């Protein structure tokens, strides 16, 4: 139930496989069980990384969140749930967010040391039913679809995972997840609004990642679905893409949008998504994470451990020679121009010097 191998698809599959457990006698929900303190927590699979000022934050299985000021010595945070966590976001050095299974949304106001629950799957179900359960126009097919989705979500319980989180500042942000699940807050998580009716995703594809790029916010999903926030309509509209495979994430700057996903596929746009070119990454493995570092270069990491770097805004990539190869699920900037990689076996720090060209062993 973590982001290894094909990352979000396995997150979904693992979740669906364990659904019967919620009905078993004696079952205690991870939402009601604080994360256990363990000296080995940093050695367990880590799904997410984030930078909080000069501090590095890591999150993974069973509600484990850890923080380090030197990427070497790690302290386990106090977390009120034991749900598997999938993504982190820190819009400032003190204010942070984590999301994961059971629809959990956690918040920290002390740089990741302690966390409180702001939302979970049961509360999300209530939000969906309130917004979509009694459509003003019952004859509207889209309204009926949203109503049925909300009722199904509520009937199945707090089982749907959230897969990504992004905040523009300390108050405004989004969380996204399985089956077109997306919510927005404008008051720092005090209240949340469902946005399913504002997304061009009629087949309810899983929403895997969202990030700012080309002056707006982009989302990626299953089957090559790319969405772009239209500021005027406040709606995520579909962007045509010459690729139909699942996309796991994206990176971008003021002009660039680069999306990545299954089997080493990556595509980039320099015109806000109007046109796309295929990027030769030189690998066939799924790309699970990406990062733009301070010098402007782009990093992509794969499920089997490759780390790629581009110094020409994603036009070409070269291989970064690694001290140790392990499946990668997340990237974050580290001190002295290095990068932190997370995955199986915890977090490691890698130099970005002396790139090896793509294709060399």
Image (tube, rainbow, N blue to C red):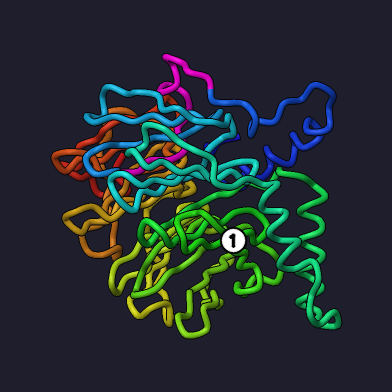
The verdict on residue 41 being magenta is yes
- The answer to whether 235 appears left or right of 96 in the picture is right
| Residue displayed at 41% across by 41% down | 108
Q: Is residue 159 above or below residue 318?
A: above
Q: Horizontal and vertical percent for residue 55?
A: 26, 37
Q: Looking at the image, can residue 310 be seen?
A: yes
| Residue displayed at 79% across by 75% down | 135
Q: Quadrant of the C terminus?
A: top left
Q: Horizontal and vertical percent for residue 211?
A: 41, 62
Residue segment shown in magenta: 36-51
The verdict on residue 351 being magenta is no
- The answer to whether 127 appears left or right of 249 in the picture is right
Q: Horizontal and vertical percent for residue 71?
A: 26, 29
- The answer to whether 317 appears left or right of 195 in the picture is left
Q: Which residue is mark 1?
A: 182
**Quarter of the figure with residue 144:** bottom right
Which of 211 and 241 lies nearest the eye of the viewer?
A: 211
Which of 146 and 244 lies nearest the eye of the viewer?
A: 146
| Residue displayed at 82% across by 50% down | 155
Q: Is residue 227 above or below residue 99?
A: below
| Residue displayed at 20% across by 42% down | 352
Direction top: furthest residue = 39
Q: Quadrant of the N terminus?
A: top right
Which of 202 and 318 lies nearest the eye of the viewer?
A: 202
Element carrying mark 1: strand
**Quarter of the figure with residue 277:** bottom left
Q: Looking at the image, can residue 7 be seen?
A: no
Q: Is residue 171 above or below residue 116?
A: below
């Amino acid at each position: 139930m973590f982001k290894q191998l094909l990352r979000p698809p396995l997150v979904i599959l693992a979740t669906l496989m364990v659904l019967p457990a919620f009905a078993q006698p004696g079952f205690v929900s991870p939402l009601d069980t604080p994360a256990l303190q363990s000296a080995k927590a940093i050695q367990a699979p880590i799904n997410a990384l984030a930078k909080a000022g000069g501090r590095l934050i890591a999150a993974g299985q069973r509600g484990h969140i850890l923080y380090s000021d030197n990427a070497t010595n790690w302290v386990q945070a106090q977390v009120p749930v034991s749900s598997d966590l999938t993504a982190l976001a820190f819009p400032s050095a003190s204010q942070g967010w984590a999301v994961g299974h059971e629809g959990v949304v956690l918040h920290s106001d002390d740089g990741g040391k302690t966390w409180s629950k702001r939302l979970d799957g049961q509360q999300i179900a209530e939000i969906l039913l309130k917004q979509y359960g009694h459509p003003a126009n019952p004859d509207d097919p889209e309204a009926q679809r949203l109503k049925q989705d909300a009722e199904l979500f509520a009937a199945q319980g707090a089982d749907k995972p959230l897969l990504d989180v992004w905040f523009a500042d300390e108050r405004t942000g989004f969380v996204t997840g399985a089956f077109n699940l997306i919510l927005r807050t404008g008051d720092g998580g005090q209240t949340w609004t469902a946005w399913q009716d504002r997304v061009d995703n009629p087949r309810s594809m899983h929403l895997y990642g969202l990030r700012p790029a080309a002056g707006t916010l982009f989302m990626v999903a299953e089957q090559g679905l790319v969405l772009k926030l239209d500021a005027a309509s406040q709606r995520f509209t579909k962007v045509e893409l010459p690729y139909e495979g699942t996309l796991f994430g994206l990176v971008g700057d003021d002009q660039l949008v680069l999306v990545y996903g299954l089997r080493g596929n990556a595509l980039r746009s320099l015109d806000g998504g109007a046109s796309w070119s295929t990027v030769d990454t030189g690998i066939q493995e799924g790309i699970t994470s990406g990062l733009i570092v301070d010098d402007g270069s782009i990093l992509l990491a794969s499920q089997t451990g490759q780390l790629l770097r581009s110094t020409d805004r994603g036009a070409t990539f070269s291989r970064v020679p690694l001290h140790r190869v392990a499946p990668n699920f997340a990237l974050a900037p580290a001190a002295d121009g290095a990068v932190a990689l997370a995955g199986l076996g915890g977090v490691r720090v890698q130099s970005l010097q002396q790139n090896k060209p793509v294709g060399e062993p």
